[in-house]
Structures are given as structure tokens and as C-alpha cells.
Amino acid sequence: MSKLNIDKPEYSNTDANAYAAIDLGTNNCRLLIAQPTPNGFDVVDGLSKTVRLGEGVAATNQLNPNAMGRTLNAIRSCAQKINNWNIKRIRCVATEACRRAKNGEEFLNRVVHETGLSFEIVTPNLEAHLTLNGCIPLFVPEKPKILLFDIGGGSTEIVWAEMTDPSTPHILGVLSFPMGVVTLAETYGVDLLESEKFNQICGGVAKILAPFDSQYKISEAIEAGHVQMVGTSGTVTTLGALTLGLERYERKRVDGLQMSFKIMHQQISEILSIDIDARRGIPCIGLERAGLMVMGCALLKAICTKWPVGELRIADRGIREGLLLEMIEKDRQNTAPLENPSSAIPITTTYIRR
């Protein structure tokens, strides 16, 4: 059993303090390790594993043994990586799968016992704040309103924010609803989807978005040309890679890519026209994501149809970057933890190796 060595660390990298952040989602477990710089941080190590922790949770409200076993193995791998660095602070968060599952807390207690890593189950609001904060480097000052979305495995978050100065976003509203690529795939299947069912999903999402749109007058701001849209999810990063014609995924080329709605809809149509075996054969989709792309496309199309901004900036970043920034800024200021992570300074992120 691999357990994080907190009391007597044996680090192989002792020349500088580092920070570690883990985002445990419904589908993936992701780790970033970073060292602070004057304007942000440099990412020096990381890990991303598909764990499908939320498998079956929508139907049973329970984490199943196989999913917990896969996730524990991934977290052990994270702990091993963390032990290779001189870690000053660690923060680990869990999102929708653990929020929804009745045995979520019980599982995380087991994680502490077996790996030494302590996870907190974050609220949708905090999840949205952290995601927004992690995406700050991608925002442009020319358009004061920000429409940010995160299509997850078990839920989708929408953040409506504004730039209060050239570098700091202020959240105006957050919408979180329990529909994600995993939960929808478990309901509708992973292969070809009839257009009627696809439109049914899109229509259901549109009804969820409508009150949020009315409350904050988002459509009016879009018509006025004041809105920039940023999307962070495996769905949009995969579509970005396909748009670039990449044989293998390259984060540095996809993160920050601006994609027109015209190109996005073309890519969605192509995904919907091929079966799961054909999707598996596309290098930037592969085995793990092939069964989730149709549902991700449904959620993405519903969001972009409701809010026709015209172009989308793709973000391969989010919660982990927000966690790292908050910890680093806390130490810089030597104060209590930030009450509102989105009020922190913007970050400059350099990915050295993953």
C-alpha cells in the first residue's frame, strides 16, 4: 500500500518549494505540481488518469467497488509523484461524483487512510470559482462579460462573470446542473444516437439554461457584442485537437485556441455521423473518450445554441490551476485563505513537463 509520506518526506527535488493540487472528478483524477514564480507558477509535474469514479452513481447514488478501486490506484500514483517533490502545500478536491454519492465521504475517509491524501468535497459554487480563476490568462479585456462553461462527467457548470479591471474577473452568477457526459452516456448509451433523442437532450438543457439567461440578461449582452465565451472540458479540447488535425493531443496548441461556431458545428456533425468504433480509431479521441463524445457534443451544442456568441476559446485548464493560485497567493500574503478565489491575481502558467 502506497501512503503519502507527510511526516518524514524523502524528496528527490529539494531545491525549491512546490505546491500540489488534485481534482477528483466524475471521470478523471488529475494532479498538477507547480513551483511559484513572480507572476504565477510553473507546472513541473502532473498526472491525469481516467477513473470513472461516477460510474453508476446517477442510478444508485453509490460509488461502486470497481470505480473506487480504480480511483484509489490513481490517487496512489499521485501520492508517489507528490513524494518526489518538496511540497509546501497540498490541496485535493472532489466534485460531483462524491457530492452525489451517499458513500462519498466514506470513500474519501478510506483514501486518507490508504494514501495519506485528504480530499474535500467542494460545492458547485466553489468549483466554479476555482475554474474561473484557473482560466484567467485566457480572458481578453476587450469584452467585459465572460461566459465560462465546464462540461464535466457528472455535472455542468456555467459561470457568468465580468472584468472589473483589466485582469480580475468578478462572478455575477453560477449555474450548476447534474448533467454530464458520464451520466448522459449511462442514460442514452455510447454509440450512434437518433436525432430525436439528441434534440431531446439539447431541448432539456435549453430549458435549464433559460431562467439563468433571463436573470442575468446574457442574450442581450451577447447581442451587444460584450461577451467572450470560454469552454473547459474534454469535449471542447478534443474538438480543438480535431480542428487542428493533430495526430496526438498537444496541450500547448489546444489551450487558448479560438474556434468559430461554424467549425465547431461541423466537427459535432462529423462526430454524430460515425459509430463508436470509428471514434475509437481517431487518435485524439481514442478508447477512453469515444463513448463520451456524443453526450459532450449534445451539451456543447445546447449551450452554444442558447448563447450564440459566435466563437469559443478552448481552455485546457481549470480547477487545479485555481487551487494552485489560491495556495500560492495565501502564502504570499501570509493571511487567511481567500474567501473568493476569483479575486486573486492573474496567473502566468508555464508547463515544463507533464
Image: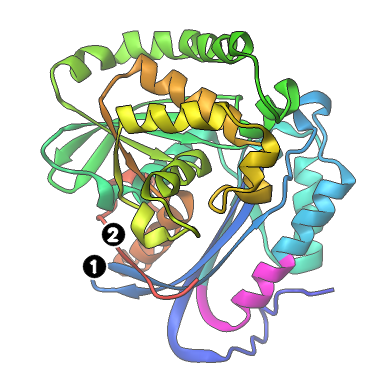
Residue 5 locus on image (x, y percent):
70, 79
* Residues at circles 1 and 2 in contact by the CB criterion of under 8 Å: yes
- Say whether residue 18 is magenta: no
- Say whether residue 80 is magenta: yes
Q: Which residue is mark 1?
A: 39
The answer to whether residue 26 shows anywhere in this view is no
User: Which residue sits at x=52%, y=77%?
Assistant: 87
Sequence-first disc among 1 and 2: 1
**Left or right: residue 219 compared with residue 116:** left
Q: What coloring was used for the rendering?
A: rainbow
The answer to whether residue 279 shows anywhere in this view is yes
Which residue lies most toward the right here?
65
Relative vertical location of residue 231 with respect to residue 203 in this rendering, above or below: below
Under circle 2, the secondary element is loop
Residue 265 locus on image (x, y percent):
40, 26
Name which residue type carries label 2: Ile
- Structural crowding at the residue carrying mark 2, measured as other residues with C-alpha within 10 Å and reported as few (<14), some (14–19) or many (≥20): many
User: Which residue sits at x=44%, y=55%?
Assistant: 246
Observer-nearest residue: 101 or 238?
238
In whole angstroms, how far apart are the C-alphas of marks 1 and 2? 6 Å
Relative vertical location of residue 152 with respect to residue 303 in this rendering, above or below: below
User: Which residue sits at x=68%, y=36%?
Assistant: 276
Observer-nearest residue: 184 or 159?
184
Q: Which residues are magenta?
A: 76-88
Q: Which residue is mark 2?
A: 347
Name which residue type carries label 1: Asn
Q: Quadrant of residue 72?
A: bottom right
Observer-nearest residue: 116 or 279?
279
**Left or right: residue 340 compared with residue 8:** left
User: Which residue sits at x=51%, y=9%?
Assistant: 203
Residue 113 locus on image (x, y percent):
80, 63
State which quarter of the image contains the N terminus.
bottom right
